[in-house]
Amino acid sequence: HTSKLWGGRFASGPAEAMAALSLSTHFDWRLARYDIAGSRAHARVLHRAGLLSEDELTAMLAALDKLESDVDSGAFTPVPADEDVHTALERGLIERAGPALGGKLRAGRSRNDQVATLFRMWLRDAARQVAAGVLDVVDSLVSQAKAHPDAVMPGRTHLQHAQPVLLAHHLLAHAQSLLRDVDRLRDWDARAALSPYGSGALAGSSLGLDPAAVAAELGFDGPVENSIDGTASRDFAAEIAFVLAMLGVNLSRIAEEVILWNTAEFGYVTLDDAWATGSSIMPQKKNPDVAELTRGKSGRLIGNLTGLLATLKAQPLAYNRDLQEDKEPLFDSVEQLSLVLPAVAGMLGSMTVHTSRLAELAPAGFTLATDIAEWLVRQGIPFREAHEAAGECVRLAEARGVGLDELTDQELAGAHSALGPEVRSVLTVTGSVASRDAYGGTAPVRVAEQLGRLESRVTDA
Ligand code: ARG
């Protein structure tokens, strides 16, 4: 058991099942690059504290460089006796620097502060990659919005036809929520940007090491305030797990709409062949698998969040081995999103939108009824009364199987004495859409402004 980090007081090595349970290299190996970066920074503060000579520091850094290139090339990999990534890399260092020098690096640090730091580093890089992937999805939504600036569609509430809206307005609604996810990732980073290195096992270090220097070298804004908190807290992991789950849910809502839009009944869009799949038995099928997998994986992202929260609940301070369970859910959420985001961007950017179908459906289901009521309000009629009259128009039109614009002058006047034939000026989809011209509304002029602001947020992001 000499390769273990903690062999001294043990008479025997671990039982096989103990070691199997304990092992984490199959997932935490992806922290290797960050562990080596942490080791370099740690070597420098040991040197500054007088615990490594100039020559020892030089030799230590050279051995770490060699170790890193061997990790990169695959020449150095963990073996089953290495409990975790930290143990494996210490073995690798000792093999390269010799036990006299290699054995010095562990002074003043613990795997508890190491892993808390490396996990933050990994997540901060992952957050930036996820944000870039989200911006690509936003780009696809924006390009579809720009390609169809005048397209109208039935806006829905309760999935029922409600009021006509611009397709661009609807697409940008999704873009807005995705940009908030990008904002959330950035806001999260500001809190996660503190380094636990130097917290030691939980109480800090007695060796005169400078946590601020390590933090700066590793790209953090500074060291954590409290060594117990530094090693025990994982709210940084739970918080980003939420942001990723929220992103998954936002993507799932887009996906659900694409699935509906792609049906024969809706007929709003046709998916590009490259972003759809066929059926092994039904030759005619073109299935929206990208959207379905996106919708499905959102459940997994939610599970990763709730699983982590359950792991954290009721853990006493400071470090407990339970915390080793923090990494896989986050690695998984990031990995799933790295698969989902480019596929969603590709699917949305390449789908064909059937604007004439959307235009035909836009007024269906009496979506212009509100326009009648609001026209009456502009004539001074109380809304209560106007709503009633517009409802009567719907009843008449429905009974005759005609549109609201096809009601006779007599029928209109019968619904309300103030309802003259001039009301027909608002009974067009384009008139209705153009009239909703307050800030944030669906009028083309407002949507164009919204698009401009949104694009500058994307540029700044
Ligand atoms: N592999 C552990 C983790 O991921 C870090 C090791 C800490 N182990 C310990 N016995 N203190 O959390």
Image (tube, rainbow, N blue to C red):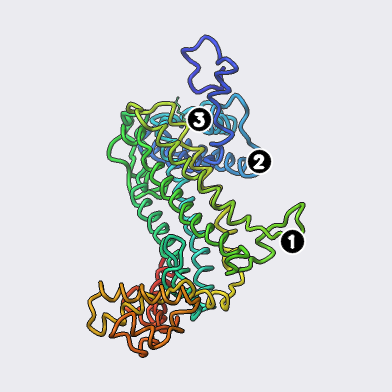
The answer to whether one can see residue 277 in this image is: yes
What is the three-letter code of the residue carrying label 1? Answer: Gln
For label 1, the SS is loop
The reply to whether dot 3 and dot 2 touch (C-beta < 8 Å) is no
Q: Left or right? Give the position of 422 relative to 283.
A: left
Query: Which of the two labelled residues, at mark 1 and mark 3, occupies the earlier sequence position?
Result: 3
- Is disc 2 placed on a helix, strand or loop? loop
Q: Is residue 41 above or below residue 277?
A: above
Alpha carbons under labels 2 and 1: distance apart = 46 Å
Check contact, mark 1 vs mark 3: CB within 8 A: no
Secondary structure beneath dot 3 equals: helix
Q: Amino acid at mark 3?
A: Leu
Which residue is denoted by mark 3 in the rendering?
101
Q: Nearer the viewer, residue 322 or 165?
A: 165
Identity of the residue furthest to the bottom in this view: 422
**Left or right, residue 144 beside residue 222:** right
294 is higher (above) or lower (below) than 149: above
Q: Position of residue 340 (x, y in %)?
A: 57, 54
Residue on which the image places disc 2:
74
> What x and y, as percent, mark residue 231?
36, 33
* 257, above or below 121, in the image: below
Image point 38% across, 39% down: which residue?
45
Is the CB of the residue bearing disc 1 within 8 angstroms of ligand 1? no
Q: How many marks?
A: 3
